[in-house]
Amino acid sequence: MSHTSSSQPASRWLALVSICVATFLIPQSMSAVNIALPVIASELQADAVKLSWLSTVNLWANVVLMLPAGRLADMIGAKRVYIFGTLCFALSSLLVLVVQDVDQLLVVRLLQGLSSSMVFGTAMAIVSSVFADSSRGTALGLTSTSVYLGLTCGPLIGGWLTEYSGWRSVFWGPVPLIIIAVLLVVVNVRLAKKEGKKERFDWTGSLLFTLWVTALFIGLSGLPEPLYLVLIGAGVVLLWCFVRQQLSVEYPLVRLRALRENRVLNRSMLTSLFMYGAHAPVLFLLSLYLQYIQGLSPTESGQLILVQALTMAFVSPLAGRLSDRFPAHLIATLGCLLFGAGFAILLMLDGQANTSLLVSGLFVQGLGFGLFSSPSSNAALASVPRERLGIASSLLNLARTQGNMFGMAIVVLLFNLMLGATEIGPEQYPQLLTVIRFTLALALGYTLLAAYFSYSRGRSEAA
C-alpha cells in the first residue's frame, strides 16, 4: 500500500482522529450486546446456547472475511475497503428494527461480523501507512486505545441504552455517529493511488480458508458429539489443503514462505492469538456473573467493567510512545504477564459480592493489555514492507479474531456441557460459576503462552 499523499502533520493527525472515531464506535456497538443479553434472552426466549452464540457468531464472521479483506486492500486500496465495510456495518445494524426472534438476531450479528472484518482488517494498515515515517507507535497506540476503549465501554453504554431505550437501541443507536465517522474518513484520509502490476484475487484460497475455519469452529463448539469430532477432522484436512494451495498459486492470500521467515511477524501473531483468546470471554462472562449471580443492573455492571477500559485507555498511548524508543517486545511481554496476573486475581471470585477484588483484577488486566497492544502491533508492522501493510494488518487482526473466536468457542462448548438448552435461572448459577472459573483458569494459561511468544520474537528494526 502506498503512503499518504500529504505529509502535513495536521493532515496526518486529522486522518488518525477519523479512523479512531470509527474504530471506537464499531467495537463499542458490538460489545454492548453482551450487557443486553439477559434482557434479549427474556424478550426473545433465547436459551443458554443461543445466548452464547449471540456473542460468538459475529467473531466467526469476522475471521472468515479478514484475510480476503486484507488482500483486497492491498489490491484496490485500504481506504475503499474500509469505507465499504463501515457502511455495511451501519446498514446491518439497522436491520435490528425488523427482528422478531433470536434466529433473526443471529443473522444481524453475522452481518455485523462480516462488515467489521473489512474495517479491522484495514484500519491499522491505513494508520501505519500514514505514520510510516514517524510516530507510528504513538498512532497505533491511539488506534488500539480507540478499539479497546470501544470494546470495554460497550457494556456501560449498552447498559444505559438497554435500561432507558430498550435493547434494540444498542444496535441502532451508534449508527448516526458511524455515518459521520465515514464522512470524516472520506474527507481526511488521503492515500496515494496504487501502483505496480495488477494481481489476481485468490478466490479458491478464500473459499478454503472460510471452510476450514468454519469446520474447526463449529466442531469445537459442539464437542464431544461424534458429528462435531468429524467436523474437526474435516477442518484439519481443509487447513492442509489451504496451505498446499497457498504455496502453489502465483498470487496467494498469504505468502506463507515469507511469513515463516519473518520471525517477528509470525511470533506476534501467536502472541495475539493467545492474548485475545484469553480476553474474549471476559466481558461476556463477567456481564453474566454480575447480572445473574450478583443481581446488578446492566448499568451497574457496565460501570464496573469500565475499569479495564479506562486503565487501558490511559496506558496504551504511553506504551505506544515507549515502543518508538525502546524494545517493543519487552514492553509487550510485561503486558502479557500483568494481564495474566489479572486473571489470577479474578479466579478468587465466588458467589459472594466482592467489588474490590473485581475492580483490582480488571485494573491489573487493563494495565497489562495497555502495555501489550500497541507495542506488539508496532513491532509486527515494522517488520514488513510498506506494500504489504494491508495483508500484514489483516494477519494481525486475523490472529486477534481467531483468538476471540476460539476463546468463545470454548465458552459455547462449556455452556453446552454444563448448562444446556435452558434459560439461565437461579438453579443454574452454580454451574455458571463453574464455567466462569474454568474459563478464567484457561485464560491464565493462554497469557503465559503469549508472554513466551512475545519475548521470543526478538527485537524488530523499528523497536
Image (cartoon, rainbow, N blue to C red):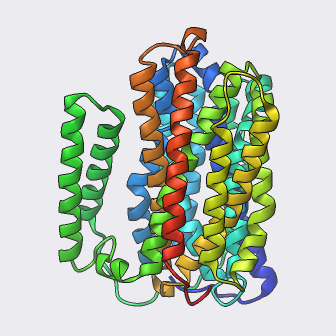
Q: Is residue 81 visible?
A: no
Name the residue at the top extreme: 427
Looking at the rendered image, the quarter that the C terminus falls into is bottom right
349 vs 211, nearest the viewer = 349
Q: Residue at x 42, y 80 (%)?
A: 263
Looking at the image, which is closer to me, 179 or 201? 201
Q: Position of residue 312 (x, y in %)?
A: 75, 57
Q: Evaluate whether residue 239 shows in this view.
A: yes
Residue appearing at x 50%, y 18% in the figure: 46
Q: Is residue 37 above or below residue 191?
A: above
Residue 116 place in picture, x, y as percent: 53, 52
Quadrant location of residue 374?
Answer: bottom right
Above or below residue 225? Residue 117 is below
Pick whichever, 127 or 317, lies toward us: 317
User: In which image quadrant can residue 332 be found?
Assistant: bottom right
Query: Position of 159 compared to 415: left or right?
Result: right
Q: Quadrant of residue 208?
A: bottom left
- Residue 142 vertical position relative to residue 111 in the rendered view, above or below: below
Name the spot of residue 418 as percent of width and height, x first: 44, 22
Percent x, y of residue 417: 39, 24
- Horizontal side, residue 432 vs residue 244: left or right: right
